[in-house]
Image (cartoon, rainbow, N blue to C red):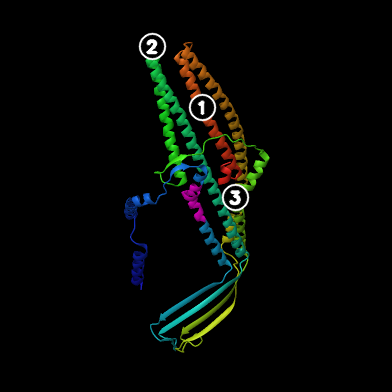
Amino acid sequence: MRPLIACFIIIYSTLFCGCINKDVIQKDLTASREHAFRQWSAQKLQKARDETIIHGKLTLEDALKLALAHNRTLQIAMEEKNVSSGLILESYGEVLPNVSLNGTYTHLDSDSKDYEGQTYRGQLDNYSGTLSVTQPIFRGGAAAAALRASKYYDMLVDENVRAAVQDTIYETVKAYYQVSLSREQQRVTQTYADLAEAHLKDVEIKRKFGVASDFNVLRSQVELSNARAELIIFQNRLHQATTSLLKTLGVSQESKVELTDHLIYKPVSVEEEEVIRKAFLNRPDLAGAELTMRLQRESLKKAYSKYWPEIDAFYGYSLSKPDPHFSTKNEWGDGWKAGIEMNISIFDGLRREGKVAQERATLRQKNIELLDKEEQALFEVRNAVLNLEDAVESVDVQKLTIEKASEGLRIAEVGYREGTLDQVSVLDARAALTKAQLLHYRSLYDHALARLDLQKAMGVLSPKESKQ
């Protein structure tokens, strides 16, 4: 008998466990990755054809529509809705009946057996089919807790999707603003480089007539080189910002777009208490934290349900050969049974106590996490309000600075033409104006971003709100 058992163990291990080690796993993993690469290589052209490619003018509104339709992160979050639907269906299993069908066939080694002087007879071939129905009646509150938990989870998924939508809107608008800023910075430095080049030509002409020196020419050449270097930097930033925007939109990097919306100053009035109220009402992370806490309460109730009896109603119908009532009658027969079953757990090795302790501690954690989320919301709202106030002040200052720098450049150019000022004064004035323009557009970007941060902190980001 022992050799037979050992043989069975070896066969079972070979069939179901397999001969496996790290080298085998690594070899299989490498082969799988190679196959994945070959698939990618074969599908590369098809994937490029399937990607969304856009051309032409792109408004902020159109950018938001594209992002909400194609953003990968948002698509992943949306799939969680299917998980939620499945969980709700699963929770109904706590209250709906369980129906199963079982069939067996048994062949005996003999139709009779002698034991202590008596002969027991049976049939060589035994057939049986059973239909079983079990209806849960009482689960100590576990069924109701499971149903409530599924609804809470469904709402939690909605809040997570809403948070993903707001994150997508935030990243899209921010990326759009970044492209707008980089475009304006590139335009300003391009103008600066063109003026520096024109000034160099003017100085070279004056040197021919002995009005300017070699130092003046060298100084203009250095100024032009610096302007071109700065232009290259902002051109690179524009390329990076555009690439980032296309990725956020979920469209092909082969797309060629021209942004039509510009950075403009949109003043907003802010009342801190009202902003905080909106944050407490609208932020998806706060709603999600509270729903998570309620989910945990249901988990605790489910753990407590183990202290109560479990009561089920059952019904079974059997069709078998031999007859289920007369085992010596080798004919098909049927029979049924029905009743109510109650199960009370007296002692389960402290599993219930341990589970309740875990769920109770987790509930305290969720309470603390909700308080932490509320404090984080207050911090983000107040920080956004302060940033918005600073951004407004910065816009006002930079607007005034541009006016002064423009007037300074006008005076320097007039003095240079009349011979009362040298070229250094003109170059300095032009550089000051360029810097003022760059800072002005930066202040517009900071204000737009501060306004966007405030909307996100309040939890009210939507395609409509983000354009205001």
Give the left or right position of residue 71, taking residue 352 as reference.
Answer: left
User: Measured from the top left, where is residue 219 in percent x and y?
Assistant: 40, 17
Above or below, 376 against 78 in this view is above
Q: Residue at label 1?
A: 437
Above or below, 313 against 251 in this view is below
Are there few (<14), some (14-19), or many (20+) residues within 10 Å of tag 3? many
- Amino acid type of disc 2? Ser
Using the numbered discs, state the Cα–Cα distance from disc 3 to disc 2 in whole angstroms.
72 Å
Residue at (59, 65) in percent of width and height: 347
Q: Residue at label 2?
A: 213
Q: Residue at label 3?
A: 289
- Viewer-proximal residue, 350 or 134? 134
Residue at (60, 29) in percent of width and height: 393
Using the numbered discs, state the Cα–Cα distance from disc 2 to disc 1 in whole angstroms.
31 Å
- Amino acid type of disc 1? Gln
Above or below, 425 against 468 in this view is above
| SS label for mark 2 | loop
Above or below, 156 against 194 in this view is below
| SS label for mark 1 | helix
Using the numbered discs, state the Cα–Cα distance from disc 1 to disc 3 in whole angstroms.
45 Å
- Viewer-proximal residue, 312 or 356? 312
Asked whether residue 223 is in view, the answer is no
Mark 2 vs 1, N-terminal side:
2
Q: Are marks 3 and 2 in contact (CB under 8 Å)?
A: no
**What residue range appears in magenta?**
65-80
| SS label for mark 3 | helix
Are there few (<14), some (14-19), or many (20+) residues within 10 Å of tag 1? many
User: Measured from the top left, where is residue 262 in percent x and y?
Assistant: 52, 36
- Amino acid type of disc 3? Ala
